[in-house]
Amino acid sequence: MLEWLESSAIARLVQETAWGYPIVLSSHAVGMAVLAGIVLMINLRVMGLASAIPLSALRTVYRVALAGLVVNVISGSMLFVANADAFFQSSPFWIKMTLLSVGIALLVVMSRRLFNASNRLNDTSPPPPLKLMAAISSVAWLGVIVMGRLIAYWDWKEF
Amino acid sequence: MMDSILTWMQNSALSSLILDTWWAFPTLEALHFIGLILLIGALYVVDLRLMGLAARVPVNAVMGFVPVALLGFIINLSTGVLFLFTDPLRYYSNTAFRLKVLAMVLAGANALWFKFAADWERIASQPHYSPAATVRWIAGISMLLWTAVIVFGRLIPYLE
C-alpha cells in the first residue's frame, strides 16, 4: 500500500520534478498560517481578547481558515505520498495526526456553537466550557505545528 | 565591512553554542513557526477586515490583534537572527533569503504608509467603518507581502 502510494503519479510529480517539492512545501506553510493563525485569533477572541468583536461576526474569517484547511489537506497528502514509508514510521507524524484530529473536532464543535443561527450563543461573552475548548484547541494547533516541524529532525524509529 | 561582520558571526561563541546543542535548532525552528502564525495570523484577520470583509467586526476592536502580531514579530526576529549566526555567509548570499528580507522591508514601508494614510478618527469612532480605497489597497498589499515572506523563507534551502 505504502509502496503503491510512493510510486503513484502524484508522488512522482513531487519527488522527481525540481520544483514539485518546494512548491508543495511552500503551499503547506501558507495554508498553515491561514488555518492555524486565524483559528488561534478566533480562540483568543473566545478567551476574551478584543471582546468588542461580536463572536458571530468572525464567521467570515472562519471561512478563510477553512480554505487554509483545504489547501493543507491537499498539500499534506501530496507530501505524505511522496515519502509514505518514512512518514508512516515517524512518531512526530502520528502525534501530529492525533493533535490534528483534536483540533479539527474542536473547530467543528466550536463553529456550530459560534456561528449556527439556531443555537447560537450570546455574542459577547462565551460560557466557560467554550473558553476551555478554545484553550485546548490552541494548544492542539501549536502542537500540530511543532510536531510537523520535528518530523524533519527525529530519527524515524527512535523517538 | 560586511565580510568582517559575517566572519565575526560565524566565529562567535553563540554560533558554536547553537550548532553544538542538538536540540537548539529544532527548538528555534518550532518557535519560529509559532511566531509565524501569531504574526501572520493576526495580520490576516486585521487585513481582511481592512479590505472590507467581515464588516460586522468593529474595526477599532480588531486592532486589538495588533499586539499579538508584534509579539509574533519579536519572537521571529529573535529566532531569525539566531539562525543567521549558524551560517551567516550562506544566508547572506542566498537568493530566497534576500527576497525574504526585501519583502519584509516592503511590508514595513507598507505599514508606515498605513500609519500615515489611514483615517484614524473614523476608525476610532465608526465601528462599521467602511475602508477607503487606499486602506483596502494597503491591507491587500500587506497580506501579499507577508505571504511572500513565508514562501521565500520556506524556499531558503531550495533557492540558493
Image: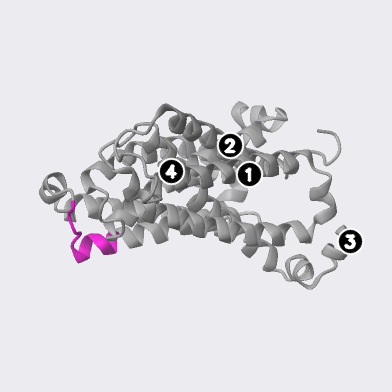
> Is residue B23 visible to the viewer in this orientation of the structure?
yes
Pick the quarter of the image with the N terminus of chain A.
Answer: bottom right
User: Between tags 2 and 3, which lies in front?
Assistant: 2
Other-residue count near label 1 (Cα within 10 Å), few / some / many at <14 / 14–19 / ≥20: some
Query: For the point 58% across and 49% down, which residue is it?
Result: B91
**Alpha-carbon span between mark 4 and mark 2:** 19 Å
Residue B133 part of the magenta segment: yes
Check disc 4 and report the residue beneath it: A113
Q: Residues within 10 Å of mark 2 (few under 14, many from 20)?
A: many
SS category of the residue bearing label 4: helix
Q: Which mark is residue A3?
A: 3
Tag shown at residue A20 = none
**Marks 4 and 3, the one that precedes in the sequence:** 3
Q: Are marks 2 and 1 in contact (CB under 8 Å)?
A: yes
Q: Position of residue A137 (x, y in %)?
A: 53, 37
Above or below B107: residue A127: above
**Residue B16: percent from the left, percent from the top?**
67, 30
Give the letter of the chain under mark 4.
A
Q: Secondary structure at mark 3?
A: helix
Which stretch appears magenta? B128-138
Alpha-carbon distance for marks 2 and 3?
A: 31 Å
Q: Is residue B124 left or right of residue A150?
A: left
Is residue B56 positioned above or below A6 on the image?
A: above
Classify B28 as above or below B121. Answer: above
Determine the CA span between mark 4 and mark 1.
Answer: 20 Å
